[in-house]
Image: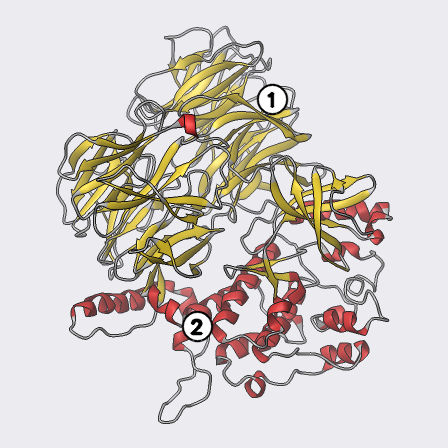
C-alpha cells in the first residue's frame, strides 16, 4: 500500500515517502498535536492481516518503545488507522550506513566512533532482553553530526510466524526470487539463524561483527553467488582475514571482529556490554595502537586489548592517566610545547560519597588552568563541595560549604564560587572560611570573568533577569530584564568570553524548539544581544570552539571569536553525557588549556516488589532511570517518570502488572515527571516545563492529547497527592525567595490555591491520610528532614513522627500504619491506633535497602513495597585531556 501526501494516520499527516522494505513502508509525517516531524512506518500485510501476530506485534513493539538510548531510534506511538497498523517514531536526518559504505571502507577512527555507538545501543537493548535479529547496514542511520542510530530494534522478529524452524528465516529470506534483496540481508545472519536454531543476543553480535568487517574491508565477510552458497559459508567457512584485506586495521579491532564472528555463540562475548566496552576503549586509545605494519625506520608496537586484571582494577588506569595528565599540564610552561595525544580517565568519588543528582544545578567544574576539579558530593543529608587535584586520587571536603550547589571558578583558578543559604559565596581553593558576595538565588551556572565581574541569573517576572556583581562583593546590577510580553521568560547559562566583558547566554521562550536554541552575545557595556549561533544546551567557549551537548553527546564546534560565528561542523568528544533538556542543563566543564570534565549519564533503575522483610519478590522489566513512581488506586498498575537519555528529559509511563505492558502516557518532547493518580485512576497529574519553569498538568491515561494545565504560577510547582474524594490536589511550590511550601488546590469549581505549610523551611512530600483528614509530610525545620502529621483543615497542630530523619511518607489503605524512609535507606513502620486524631506509636524497622532509594510506594495492605533503587556510580565523572588533538586527525 502506497500513501499519498496529505493522507492521515491518526494524528499524523503524511508528507512524503522515505523508503520501503520487509518491515513496511516508511513516510515522513507531521504530528498535528505537537507540530513535530516524525517517521511513520506502515506495517506490511503479513502483520496487518493476522490478528494473533498483530497482538504479538503490539506487545513486542511497546516493549521496544521503552528503550530510551541515544543510539536507538525512539518509538513514539503504536496505532491503527482504519485497519492500517502503523508505528510513529523519531525522524532521523542523515544517511544509512549502507549509503556511506558505497564510498568504500572507513578509516579506523570514524569506524570505531560508529561501532562503539552501535554496540552501546545493542548492549542497552540486550540488557532489557530484546534482540534485533536483523541488524545490517540498512538498519543503521548516521546523522549529520555522526550519531549512529539503530532502526527497527525489537521489531524484526514480529513479521515472523511462530512455527518452529521458521523463526529466523522470515525477516531475511523474504523473497527468494530476488537475489539482490536476499544477498543484502543473508550476509549478516549468524550460523544459528542460518540453521534455524534458537537465537539470542549473541546473534546480534555476529551481525555486528559482519558489519565491522565490511566497514574495515569494503566488502562483506560472507558474499557468494547465491543465497544457499552464502548460507553455507556462514555456517562452515571463515572470512578472508582482515589482515590481508585491510592491513591498516588496528590489531585489537581485528581480534574483536574475529570474536564476534565465531561460529559457536559461546565463543563470542558473554555480554554485549563487554563488547561495547572493548570498542569504546579501543576508540579512546586508538593513538596507542598499531596497525601491525612497520614503516621505514619505525618500530610498530602491537597493541592488545586491556588485560582482564586491569579491567578489574580501573583505579590503576586512573593513576597512570592522572600522572600523565599532570605531566601534560606542567609541560605547558616549557618553551617548546610537547604534542600529546588525547586521553581520558574516570574520577573516583570518596567512599560513601555520591554526586548530587539535582536537575538544574551544575554538579562539578574544572579549573581554568586544568589542574583542579570541584564537585558537589553528599555523604549524608547535606551536600558540600569536594576539591581534588587532577593528578591526585583523593578529594577533600571544603569546610564551610555545607548546602553548597553550583560551583564555578575564578579566572586565576584560585577561588571557587558557589551558592548556599540564599547567598552567592566564594572560598579559596587553598582553604579558609567562605566569604559572602551578595544575596540572591541562582537558577543556572554563574560565570566569573577576567574583569572581576560575576554573571548570574534569577527567574521570575518580579526581580528576574541577568545580573552582574563584583567578585569582591557589593550590590548586583541588572544587565537584562525579562520580557514576558515578548515571550522572554528566562535568561540562562551566561558564559564570559576571554575578554571579561562580552558573554554568551541563551533565552527561553514558551513552546520553543529546544534543539535549536538561539545563542546570544551580551556585554557589560551594551544592551544589544545579537544571535550568533544555534545550539541545544548551555555553552562554554574554549580552545577556539563552542562546547555543548546534543542527544547525550558532548560536541565541539569551531567558533571565530572575532567574527562571532561558527566556522565548521561539530565534532563529538564524548557520549552519554548528562543533560536535562528542561533548563538546557549539560554536565560538562572546560578549562582553557584543553581539558574537559564531564558527568556521564549512565543512570538506571532497579524497580522491584519487596516483602516486609526486604526480600525481592519480583523485578519489573523497566529500562532507564525511574525518577518517581506511584501505584494506581486499584493497585493494578504503576505510573512512573522515566528519563530519556537521548532527549535529556522525562516522560510519564504506566506499567500494567497483569498484562506486563508498559505504555507511554505523555508524548511531548519536553520534560514530564512526578506522576500522581487521580482518585478514580482515570487520569494523572504531573509536573511539566512546557512553557517555562515547571507547572502542574493533568492528562487522561487513555488520551495523551488531553493534557491541560491545572496549576500555573511563578516559580516551580510539583504535584504531591490527590485527596481520597478527588476534590483537592496538594502541590509543593518553590520560588526564588522560598524553599518548598505546601499548597492545596481545589479541583472543582474555580477555587484558588490555599496555603498549607508556609515559611522559611523546606516542606514537601505530602500525602493525604486514607480518610482525607490528615497530612503526612516532611520538613527541615528542626535542622534535619523529619516526618510530621497535621490536620488538613486546621493550622497550628503538628505531630512529629520520626526522631532520626524521615522522608517519603506512605499510608496503609486502612490508615492504621504509616511508613517513611530514613537517611540510611531503612523503611520504617509506625502504628496508628484508631481514634479521632493520630497517636503515632514507636517506629520499627521493616528492612533496609542497599543502594539509593529514589522512590517507593506501599501496597494497600502494607505487605509489599514497590521500590526504585539506583545503584551509585563510584566514578560518575570523566576527564578528557588534550581534546583539541582529536579534531586535528
Where is residue 865, by image quadrant? top right
Relative to 565, is 688 above or below? above
Horizontal and vertical percent position of residue 32: 65, 36
Horizontal and vertical percent position of residue 122: 59, 59
Q: Residues within 10 Å of mark 1 (few under 14, many from 20)?
A: many
Horizontal and vertical percent position of residue 200: 68, 62
User: How many badges with numbers are in the image?
Assistant: 2
47 vs 321, left or right, is right
Residue 209 visible, this angle: no
368 vs 541, left or right, is left
* Residue toward you, 553 or 740: 553
* Residue toward you, 175 or 824: 175
163 vs 372, left or right, is right
Q: Which residue is mark 2?
A: 306
Relative to 722, is 101 above or below? below
Mark closer to the chain start, 2 or 1: 2
* Residue toward you, 79 or 568: 568
Q: CA distance from mark 2 to mark 1?
A: 53 Å
The colour scheme applied to this rendered structure is: secondary structure
Quadrant of the image containing the C terminus: bottom left
Q: Which residue is mark 1?
A: 678
Relative to 360, is 694 above or below? above
Q: Residues within 10 Å of mark 2 (few under 14, many from 20)?
A: few
Horizontal and vertical percent position of residue 677: 59, 25
Which residue is painted at 45% across and 34% down in the image? 509
Q: Which mark is residue 575?
A: none
* Residue toward you, 641 or 485: 485
Amino acid at each position: 500500500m502506497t500513501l499519498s501526501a496529505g493522507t492521515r494516520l491518526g494524528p499524523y499527516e503524511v508528507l512524503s515517502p522515505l523508503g520501503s522494505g520487509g518491515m513496511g513502508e516508511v513516510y515522513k509525517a507531521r504530528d498535528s498535536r505537537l507540530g513535530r516531524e516524525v517517521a511513520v512506518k506502515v506495517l506490511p500485510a503479513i502483520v496487518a492481516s493476522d490478528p494473533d501476530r498483530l497482538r504479538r506485534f503490539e506487545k513486542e513493539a511497546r516493549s521496544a518503545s521503552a528503550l530510551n538510548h541515544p543510539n536507538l531510534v525512539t518509538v513514539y506511538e503504536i496505532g491503527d488507522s482504519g485497519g492500517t497498523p502503523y508505528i510513529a517514531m523519531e525522524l532521523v536526518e542523515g544517511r544509512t550506513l549502507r549509503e556511506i559504505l558505497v564510498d568504500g571502507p572507513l578509516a579506523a577512527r570514524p569506524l570505531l566512533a560508529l561501532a562503539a555507538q552501535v554496540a552501546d545501543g545493542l548492549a542497552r537493548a540486550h540488557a532489557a532482553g530484546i534482540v534485533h535479529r536483523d541488524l545490517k547496514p540498512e538498519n543503521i542511520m548516521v546523522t549529520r553530526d555522526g550519531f549512529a542510530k539503530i532502526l527497527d530494534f525489537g521489531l524484526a522478529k514480529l513479521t515472523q510466524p511462530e512455527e518452529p524452524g521458521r523463526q529466523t528465516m522470515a525477516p531475511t529470506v523474504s523473497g527468494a526470487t530476488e537475489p539482490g534483496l536476499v544477498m543484502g540481508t543473508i550476509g549478516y545472519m549468524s550460523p544459528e539463524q542460518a540453521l534455524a536454531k534458537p537465537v539470542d543476543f549473541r546473534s546480534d553480535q555476529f551481525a555486528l561483527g559482519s558489519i565491522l568487517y565490511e566497514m574495515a574491508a569494503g566488502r562483506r565477510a560472507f558474499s557468494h553467488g547465491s543465497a544457499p552458497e552464502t548460507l553455507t559459508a556462514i555456517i562452515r567457512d571463515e572470512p578472508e582475514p582482515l589482515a590481508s584485506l585491510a592491513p591498516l586495521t588496528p590489531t585489537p579491532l581485528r581480534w574483536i571482529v574475529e570474536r564476534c564472528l565465531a561460529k559457536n555463540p559461546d565463543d563470542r562475548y558473554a555480554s554485549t556490554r563487554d563488547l561495547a566496552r572493548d570498542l569504546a576503549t579501543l576508540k579512546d586509545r586508538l593513538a596507542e595502537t598499531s596497525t601491525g605494519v612497520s614503516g621505514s625506520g619505525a618500530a610498530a608496537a602491537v597493541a592488545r586489548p586491556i588485560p582482564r586484571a586491569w579491567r578489574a582494577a580501573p583505579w590503576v588506569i586512573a593513576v597512570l592517566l592522572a600522572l600523565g595528565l599532570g605531566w601534560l599540564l606542567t609541560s605547558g610552561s616549557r618553551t617548546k610545547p610537547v604534542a600529546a595525544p588525547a586521553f581520558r580517565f574516570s574520577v573516583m568519588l570518596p567512599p560513601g560519597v555520591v554526586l548530587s543528582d539535582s536537575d538544574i544545578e551544575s554538579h562539578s567544574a574544572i579549573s581554568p588552568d586544568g589542574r583542579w576539579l570541584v564537585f558537589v558530593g553528599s555523604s549524608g543529608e547535606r551536600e558540600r563541595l569536594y576539591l581534588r587535584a587532577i593528578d591526585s586520587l583523593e578529594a577533600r571536603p571544603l569546610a564551610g560549604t555545607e548546602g553548597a550547589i553550583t560551583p564555578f571558578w575564578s579566572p586565576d583558578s584560585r577561588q571557587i564560587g558557589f551558592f548556599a543559604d540564599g547567598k552567592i559565596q566564594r572560598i579559596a581553593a587553598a582553604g579558609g572560611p567562605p566569604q559572602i558576595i551578595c544575596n540572591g538565588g541562582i537558577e543556572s551556572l554563574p560565570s566569573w570573568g577576567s574583569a572581576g565581574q560575576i554573571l548570574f541569573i534569577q527567574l521570575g517576572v518580579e526581580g528576574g533577569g541577568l545580573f552582574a556583581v563584583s567578585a569582591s562583593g557589593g550590590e548586583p546590577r541588572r544587565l537584562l530584564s525579562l520580557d514576558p510580553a515578548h515571550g522572554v521568560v528566562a535568561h540562562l547559562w551566561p558564559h564570559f568570553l576571554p575578554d571579561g566583558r562580552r558573554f554568551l547566554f541563551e533565552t527561553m521562550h514558551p513552546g520553543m524548539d529546544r534543539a535549536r536554541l538561539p545563542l546570544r552575545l551580551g556585554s557589560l557595556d551594551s544592551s544589544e544581544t545579537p544571535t550568533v549561533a544555534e545550539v541545544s544546551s548551555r555553552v562554554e567557549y574554549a580552545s577556539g570552539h563552542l562546547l555543548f551537548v546534543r542527544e547525550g553527546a558532548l560536541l565541539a564546534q569551531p567558533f571565530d571569536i572575532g567574527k562571532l560565528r561558527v566556522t565548521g561542523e561539530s565534532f563529538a568528544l564524548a557520549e552519554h553525557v548528562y543533560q536535562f533538556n528542561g533548563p538546557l542543563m549539560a554536565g560538562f566543564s572546560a578549562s582553557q588549556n584543553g581539558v574537559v570534565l564531564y558527568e556521564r549519564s549512565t543512570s538506571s533503575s532497579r524497580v522491584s516488589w519487596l516483602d516486609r522483610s526486604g526480600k525481592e519478590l519480583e523485578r519489573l522489566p523497566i529500562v532507564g532511570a525511574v525518577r518517581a513512581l506511584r501505584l494506581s488506586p486499584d493497585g493494578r498498575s504503576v505510573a512512573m517518570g522515566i528519563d530519556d537519555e537521548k532527549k535529556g528529559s522525562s516522560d510519564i509511563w504506566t506499567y500494567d502488572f497483569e498484562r506486563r505492558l508498559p505504555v507511554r502516557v505523555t508524548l511531548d518532547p519536553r520534560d514530564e515527571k512526578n506522576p500522581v493518580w487521580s482518585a478514580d485512576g482515570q487520569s494523572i497529574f504531573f509536573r511539566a516545563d512546557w512553557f517555562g519553569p515547571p507547572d502542574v498538568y493533568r492528562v487522561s491515561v487513555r488520551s495523551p492529547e488531553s493534557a491541560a494545565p491545572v496549576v500555573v504560577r511563578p516559580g516551580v510547582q510539583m504535584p504531591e497527592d490527590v485527596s481520597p474524594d478527588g476534590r483537592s490536589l496538594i502541590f509543593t511550590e518553590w520560588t526564588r525567595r522560598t524553599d518548598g511550601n505546601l499548597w492545596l488546590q481545589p479541583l472543582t469549581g474555580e477555587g484558588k490555591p490555599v496555603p498549607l505549610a508556609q515559611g522559611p523551611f523546606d516542606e514537601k512530600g505530602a500525602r493525604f491520610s486514607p480518610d482525607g483528614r490528615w497530612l503526612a509530610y516532611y520538613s527541615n525545620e528542626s535542622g534535619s528532614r523529619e516526618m510530621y502529621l497535621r490536620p488538613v483543615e486546621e493550622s497550628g497542630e503538628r505531630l512529629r513522627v520520626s526522631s532520626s530523619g524521615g522522608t517519603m511518607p506512605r499510608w496503609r489503605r486502612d490508615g492504621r500504619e504509616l511508613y517513611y524512609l530514613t537517611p540510611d535507606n531503612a523503611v520504617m513502620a509506625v502504628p496508628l491506633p484508631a481514634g479521632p486524631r493520630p497517636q503515632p506509636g514507636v517506629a520499627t524497622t521493616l528492612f533496609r535497602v542497599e543502594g539509593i532509594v529514589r522512590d517507593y510506594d506501599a501496597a494497600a495492605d502494607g505487605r509489599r513495597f514497590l521500590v526504585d533503587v539506583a545503584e551509585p556510580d563510584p566514578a560518575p565523572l570523566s576527564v578528557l585531556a588534550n581534546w583539541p588533538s582529536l579534531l586535528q586527525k
